[in-house]
Amino acid sequence: MRNRSKVAPGWWDYTTLNEDILNEVEKLTFKDVVELSRTGFEIKIYDTLESFYMAEALEYVSTWEKSTIDNPKGICGPIGPTEQLPLIAQIVNDLDINIKDGHFWAMDEWFINNQEVAISHPLSFARKNMDLCFNRIRKELIMPSENLRFLRSDNIKEYSRSFDEINCLIMQGGQGEAKHWAFNDPVKREGIYKENPPSPEEYKKLGTRVVDLHPITIIQNARTSGSGAVYNIPLQAITVGPIETWKASKISIWHAGNHDNPFGMRLTAFMISKKIPDSSVPMSLLADHPNVVFNFYRPALEIFQTGLH
């Protein structure tokens, strides 16, 4: 029997894992985490936030520089983190880099009343991408609007199909407290998943879709995006799925410590390194992807302690 969730009994999540795994992760030191690198899974450490976000921004620019009309390439990127976005625009503008042939996929978008939120919505991911990055790039350098793919309720199939038409060199992301990438959250504990969560094989068959958000995700986004106003956070989102993720040549996850905690970052690194995929920890399914990189900001990972404060 799997453990009952300690945070949301009607859902699957990392607290339903075998306690042997959780106890082993709790004992990991910073040095232990760094040594979890293996073939197909690399761990990188950055000592400053400046170097961390600059490296993340450069992944965008270097991807777009490789793209041509005859051989289109692109990057799929998150909102969370966002600090890299203004840096991307500055690099492109200051170095006069022509990115007209580049492509971009937004990973996800909020979904309310059976449609994506309008770009005027204060929580709109499309709005944040445009305001912090694409609207800041000089018009003579920027790619055409049709090369920017933002998720909508009416373009899910087209969005998914574009991963077969354009080479996604990198899928970037952060990690949420539900241990998701994009909004690939654990599922509800009901129906055929009452006793066990979906198998890794089942979960990996999911494509771009509308999802119900785990309570952990709602609380996290209230903290990071709404000053704690949980009632303002949508209950659903449209998200890129595992099907599209496995079409990306590289998965690049950026852990600055703002969207998950030291235990969570250790947990997914451990499960990917040791090849322990479990859909209650969606990020762990990347154990089966051939090229995954975890990028850590050192201070966010170094300190791990249990005790009152």
Image (cartoon, grey):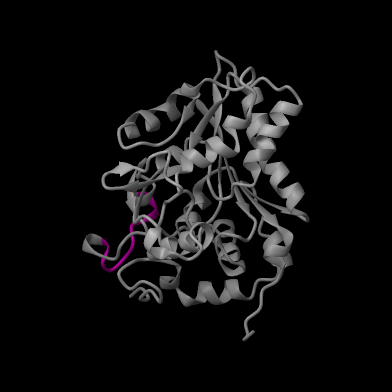
Whether 157 is among the magenta residues is: no
> Is residue 76 visible to the viewer in this orientation of the structure?
no
Q: Name the image quarter holding residue 135.
A: top right
Image point 64% across, 84% down: which residue? 309
Residue at the location (56% across, 21% down)?
A: 143
Q: What kind of secondary structure does the magenta stretch mostly adopt?
A: loop
In the image: residue 173, left or right of residue 215: right
Residue lying furthest top: 70
> Which image quarter: residue 136?
top right
Residue 220 visible, this orientation: yes
- Residue range (magenta): 193-201
Quadrant location of the N terminus in the rendered image: bottom left
Q: Residue 107 in the image: x percent, y percent?
A: 47, 41
Front-lying residue, 225 or 49: 225
Residue 199 magenta-highlighted: yes
Instruction: Choose between 220 and 3: the one closer to the eye.
Output: 220
Q: In this view, does 147 lie above or below 122?
A: above
Tell me the quarter of the picture where residue 243 sits.
top left
**Residue 248, relative to residue 111: is it above or below?**
above
Q: Which residue is drawn at 51% across and 58% down?
A: 176
Outermost residue toward the bottom?
A: 308
- Answer above or below: position of 3 versus 150: below
Percent across and percent down for residue 231 are 37, 63
Total marks placed: 0
**Image location of residue 303, percent across then percent down:** 70, 71
Spot occupied by residue 116 in the image (x, y as percentages of width and height)? 35, 41
